[in-house]
Amino acid sequence: MAGSDHGRFEVIRPDYLADEYWDSIEIEVTRLSRSLDAGDQSEALGNLKCLAEAVAKVALDIAGKPAASNASVTTVISAAHEVLRTQPGHELTFETPYANIATNASKMAAQLAEIRNTYGGGHGKARQPRVRDEMVDLTIDGTLTWVRWAVRRLGLFAKGQPTELIRDLIIENQSFYKGDLAERLRATGLPRLEERHQRSIGIAVGQRSAQHTFNVYLEGVQPAQTSADLDVWTPLFRLGVAQGLLQGTDEVPTATLTNIVRAVAVLLPVEGHVEEVSEIVDQALDTFEAPVDLMAQAESVRENTRDLQRLASKGGPNHRTVERLLVGLRERFPEIWVL
């Protein structure tokens, strides 16, 4: 009965879950399959406990709250369930009846420690307990209800985690297709993040945009350029974007005239960060170099200088700093203004 249909405990890998995390889950599924193939039901009960524990520990690790080495399985599963239960996401259901199903499933999974200690492998016993088929079937069904719910949410959870997004933007240089960044920024709940995460994401978005990744510019920079909304595009995110546009991941300046215009537009509505905005503008002045092939880029240069003048005339909390930038560029690089 328990070993007749292994397809019923298939666990599907979600999008956005890193290889190292999926490997930790998949190996436990494989071990469970081997135990059932061998007819070792006691070992299978132990494997089920390890599977649920691996899923829970992955969730906590992604959340930046790794489980303590001496934490009980019950504690780990409960903590992971709370993290996944409260994650934001328009794809997710929070209605009470469905939330109760997931919570009750977590309580079933939390029983695994006692089941494993009494009936499972991993502990030497004077007498082997009798493990009935129904025990294994019931434990598999109960455990996998929670495991599958949790794994489905793990993908969405990873998608919205700042560290995962930053990694994909500037460490792994993952491809971002149309809609990808917009969806992942929504999944982060950007305005609710810690300020350090808001800024770090902004820096990563700016740096990737400076690498000419069009979709990242289109969905992460341009909306902040064209909107003065500080609730959606927060001041810390904007400061990060501007900083990232002007300096690459290897600390090589990327202060082209186009990136300076974009940084200024993003910064213009920011309030309460006068010194930081001024430092970013100084960085732009110090690291900008006029294009060597100035005449070949004449049309782009003219468009950018017009945009800078337009931005300087718009007013706002940082317009004086923008005016200073404009004056500085005119004094240091008069050639770009006579095209």
Image: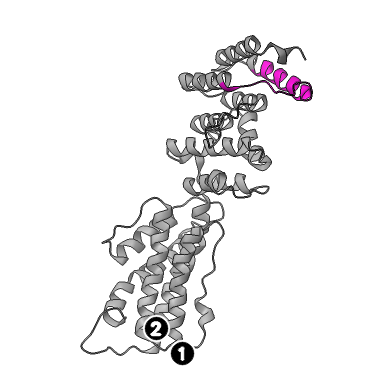
Q: Give the color scheme: rainbow, by chain, secondary structure or one colour.
A: one colour
Nearer to me, 315 or 312: 312
Earlier sequence position, callout 2 versus callout 1: 1
Which residue was labeled with disc 2? 136
The image shows residue 4 at horizontal and vertical percentages of 50, 88
Residue ID at (56%, 25%): 267
Q: In the image, what residue type sits under mark 2?
A: Val
Which residue was labeled with disc 1? 1
* The magenta segment: 287-311
Q: What is the residue that sits farthest to the front in this orientation? A: 292
Please say if 291 is above or below 12: above
Nearer to me, 224 or 47: 47
The image shows residue 245 at horizontal and vertical percentages of 58, 31
The image shows residue 319 at horizontal and vertical percentages of 58, 15
| Quadrant in which the C terminus appears | top right
Whether residue 284 is visible here, answered yes or no, is: yes
Nearer to me, 34 or 130: 34
Of helix, strand and loop, which one carries label 1? loop
Residue ID at (54%, 80%): 7
Horizontally, residue 178 falls left or right of residue 245, namely right
**Magenta-span inclusion, residue 135:** no
Please say if 27 is above or below 166: below
Assess disc 1: are there few (<14), some (14-19) or many (≥20) residues with their C-alpha within 10 Å of its C-alpha.
few
Please say if 39 is above or below 188: below
User: What secondary structure characterizes most of the magenta part?
Assistant: helix
Q: Residue 209 carries which label?
A: none
Residue ID at (35%, 77%): 46
